[in-house]
């Protein structure tokens, strides 16, 4: 159903295309649904995406590589420039400190002119602007000018050298950097500071370093102090004006990115960043300057000085991608035409075949690849299908004309899975022929059997009448037996109840006998305990008698003094003898009582055993009575079922009698239908040798299959 639906849709779309009713969007959609369109779009999408990603990745990597290289280069340049500034400052600091260790300058014996000469020589040799010596009060010994309030004088008097930020000269014409050092007494470091020496290098030595530091054609460098003021720049006016971007950013939002970077500079950090200044995007690398007054140096340059080659590379990459896509479009469309067009033509022919078109020619394909194989396979499919369908149509047409002796004219085409079609058609033919033969034979048997069935039905009706009378008599007899069984069941149930009552009384008597036996056992145990007590009393009497004898012996030894004790001992012995006699009499009585208790216990046990046997017998009688009651109850139920079954049999016998009469009438009608069926079967033409024909066709089919396999 889905293939038929898709075929109908394709046919409808082709009809619309022929009539010119398809819109451009519909035509594009139909093109995308074809193999040609799918190959074109898939490959182009793959090529375009791959080349685009390659171009983007290449451009990004080039840009990233350029930025990384620029960052490293500018950071390295910033470090080198900072080291140069540090070296320059350190050199001037060393000159000032060395001058402060000159003994003649701190000696009172040397005159002012001599000291001036020494200072001027040092200034001239090192290319400085000037030098000066301040006494301990900050007064210049050359000009008499006071420097007592300056930072460099106060630091030098504390024993440390000091470098100032650029200071505007008094005439506002130049910038000066003063390097001061302590003047040590006698020229010995660590002794008393007796004054200060300071030197003034060339006013633009810091600016010259900034001018020499150039990372690109439009790049520059500058220095700031700990407050963000510019102290060195190729534009000395910015230094004189103490330009401060951090302060200006408070009123100018465009300077905030630059101010953010300069805040990191004055914090002593080293880093890299970007900002805009005057509408131009710039990059900056900055670092701090060691051994200075928290100075920092920054190297800046416009990004346009470095991105020219990167942009050119990106443009070239884009051009290469566009050219590659154009070449890919041409090659893909050619490939899609070579593959899609033959497949489309073959698919179109197969669609026509699916609609029942067996005669339209298959399109010719001139290629030498798999599409030629597809075209040849399509040709074979159409030819074989046309031959097979025409042959099946011929066989079924002959069979529809009642000719079942027809045979296939194209057995060699039924190969592979098509063999099942011929086998199915032959099976239908042989099955129908065999069925018709059997129907013919069965109709003869039905005619003969219907006569016999009529005679048997008549006899069965007479026998059913006799069976009904016998069943009525049997039903009456069974009812009498069922009544007797019911009475026996009631008597058995009554006897069972009485036997169960006697059994319960016997069980109660057995329990009493058992209690009596337990009581006799306890009496016997108590008598044994009394015998033990008497034995103990007898032992006490023997000990008392022995004690009396010993007392008599001791009294005899005592003579007259022990006479009274001897009398007491004699009485004790007499009491001991009486106690012994009483114990002997008691023992005899207890032994007689024990003998009687033992006899009573034995009689009780025997009575319990006899009573237990009686109870077991009564239980067996109760079980037997229960079994009899159950059997009687089952017999009663069985008799009721037998009664119901006999009633059903009576109804069945009556039904059979009526059915026998109907069967007799039906058999006569069946005999007439059998005659008419024989007349209808005579119209079919059947093969005289069906088995021989089948064997011959089977052999031919096997030969064809072997040839096809070869």
Image (cartoon, rainbow, N blue to C red):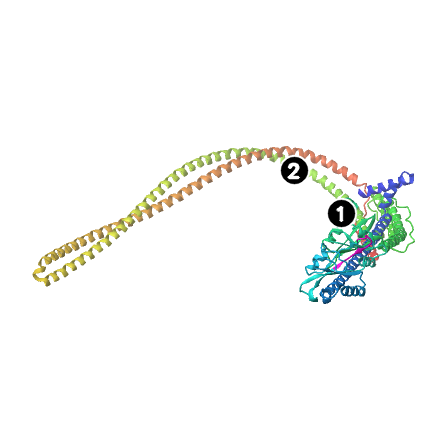
Q: How many marks?
A: 2
Report helix, strand or loop for mark 2.
Answer: helix
Q: Please tell me whether residue 102 is drawn above or below residue 37 in the rendered image.
A: below
> Which image quarter is the C terminus in?
bottom right
Whether residue 459 appears in magenta in the rendering, the answer is no
Q: Position of residue 577 (x, y in %)?
A: 15, 56
> Which image quarter is the N terminus in?
top right
Report helix, strand or loop for mark 1.
Answer: helix
When asked about the image quadrant of residue 13, the answer is top right
**Outermost residue toward the left?**
560
Q: Please tell me whether residue 209 is drawn above or below residue 352 in the rendered image.
A: below
Q: Dot 2 corresponds to which residue?
A: 456
Give the left or right position of residue 651, taking residue 219 as reference: left
Whether residue 176 appears in magenta in the rendering, the answer is yes
Q: Position of residue 491 (x, y in %)?
A: 42, 36
Between discs 2 and 1, the one toward the N terminus: 1
Q: Please tell me whether residue 699 is drawn above or below residue 668 in the rendered image.
A: below
Give the left or right position of residue 232, taking residue 591 as reference: right
Q: Nearer the viewer, residue 413 or 109?
A: 109
Q: Which residues are magenta?
A: 170-179
Label 2 to label 1, Cα distance in Å?
Answer: 134 Å
Q: Nearer the viewer, mark 2 or mark 1?
A: 1
- Mark 2 surroundings: few (<14), some (14-19) or many (≥20) residues within 10 A: some
Q: Dot 1 corresponds to which residue?
A: 247
Q: Nearer the viewer, residue 387 or 265?
A: 265
Q: Nearer the viewer, residue 651 or 591?
A: 591
When asked about the image quadrant of residue 234, the answer is bottom right
Give the left or right position of residue 307, taking residue 671 as reference: right
Q: Position of residue 479 (x, y in %)?
A: 50, 33
């Amino acid at each position: 159903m889905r293939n038929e639906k898709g075929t109908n849709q394709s046919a409808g779309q082709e009809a619309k295309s022929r009539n010119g009713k398809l819109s451009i969007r519909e035509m594009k959609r139909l093109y995308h649904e074809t193999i040609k369109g799918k190959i074109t779009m898939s490959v182009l999408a793959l090529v375009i995406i791959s080349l685009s990603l390659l171009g983007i990745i290449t451009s990004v990597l080039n840009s990233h590589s350029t930025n990384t290289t620029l960052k490293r280069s500018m950071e390295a340049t910033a470090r080198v420039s900072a080291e140069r500034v540090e070296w320059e400052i350190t050199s001037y600091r060393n000159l000032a400190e060395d001058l402060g260790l000159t003994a003649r300058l701190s000696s009172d014996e040397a005159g002012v002119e001599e000291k001036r000469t020494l200072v001027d020589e040092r200034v001239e040799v090192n290319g400085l602007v000037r030098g000066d010596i301040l006494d301990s009060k900050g007064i210049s010994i050359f000009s008499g000018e006071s420097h007592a309030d300056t930072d460099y004088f106060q630091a030098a008097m504390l024993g440390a050298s000091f470098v100032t930020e650029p200071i505007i000269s008094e005439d506002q014409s130049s910038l000066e950097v003063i390097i001061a050092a302590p003047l040590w007494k006698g020229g010995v470091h660590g002794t008393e500071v007796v004054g200060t020496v300071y030197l003034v290098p060339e006013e633009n030595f810091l600016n010259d370093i900034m001018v020499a530091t150039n990372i690109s054609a439009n790049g520059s460098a500058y220095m700031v102090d700990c407050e963000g003021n510019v102290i060195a720049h190729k534009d000395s006016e910015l230094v004189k004006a103490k330009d401060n971007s951090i302060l200006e950013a408070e009123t100018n939002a465009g300077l905030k990115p630059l101010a953010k970077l300069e805040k990191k500079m004055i914090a002593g950090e080293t880093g890299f960043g970007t900002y805009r200044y005057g509408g131009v995007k710039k990059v900056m690398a900055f670092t701090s300057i060691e051994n200075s007054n928290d100075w920092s140096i920054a190297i800046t340059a416009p990004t346009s000085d470095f991105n020219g080659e990167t942009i050119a590379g990106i443009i070239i990459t884009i051009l290469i991608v566009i050219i590659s896509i154009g070449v890919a479009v041409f090659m893909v469309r050619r490939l899609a035409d070579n593959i899609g067009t033959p497949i489309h033509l073959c698919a179109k022919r197969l669609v026509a075949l699916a609609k029942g078109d067996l005669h339209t020619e298959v399109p010719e394909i001139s290629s030498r690849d798999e599409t030629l194989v597809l075209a040849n396979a399509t040709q074979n499919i159409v030819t074989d299908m046309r031959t097979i369908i025409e042959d099946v149509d011929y066989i079924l047409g002959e069979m529809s004309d009642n000719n079942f002796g027809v045979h296939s004219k194209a057995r060699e085409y039924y190969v592979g899975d098509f063999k099942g079609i011929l086998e199915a058609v032959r099976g239908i033919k042989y099955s129908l022929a065999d069925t018709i033969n059997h129907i013919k034979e069965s109709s003869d048997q039905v005619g003969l059997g219907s006569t016999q069935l009529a005679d048997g039905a008549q006899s069965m009706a007479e026998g059913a009448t006799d069976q009904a009378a016998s069943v009525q008599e049997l039903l009456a007899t069974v009812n009498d037996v069922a009544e007797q069984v019911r009475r026996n069941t009631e008597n058995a149930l009554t006897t069972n109840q009485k036997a169960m009552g006697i059994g319960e009384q016997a069980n109660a008597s057995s329990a009493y006998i058992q209690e009596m036996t337990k009581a006799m056992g306890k009496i016997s145990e108590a008598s044994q305990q009394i015998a033990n007590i008497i034995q103990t009393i007898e032992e006490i009497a023997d000990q008392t008698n022995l004690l009396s004898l010993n007392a008599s012996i001791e009294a005899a030894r005592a003579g007259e003094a022990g006479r009274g004790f001897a009398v007491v001992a004699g009485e004790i012995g007499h009491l001991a003898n009486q106690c012994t006699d009483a114990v002997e009499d008691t023992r005899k009585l207890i032994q007689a009582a024990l003998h009687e208790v033992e006899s009573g216990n034995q009689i009780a046990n025997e009575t319990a055993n006899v009573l237990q046997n009686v109870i077991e017998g009564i239980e067996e009688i109760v079980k037997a009575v229960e079994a009899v009651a159950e059997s009687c109850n089952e017999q009663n139920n069985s008799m009721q079922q037998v009664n119901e079954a006999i009633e059903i049999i009576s109804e069945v016998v009556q039904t059979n009698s009526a059915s026998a009469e109907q069967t007799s009438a039906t058999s006569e009608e069946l005999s007439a239908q059998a005659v008419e069926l024989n007349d209808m079967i005579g119209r079919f033409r059947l093969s005289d040798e069906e088995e021989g024909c089948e064997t011959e066709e089977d052999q031919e089919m096997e030969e064809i299959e072997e040839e096809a396999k070869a």
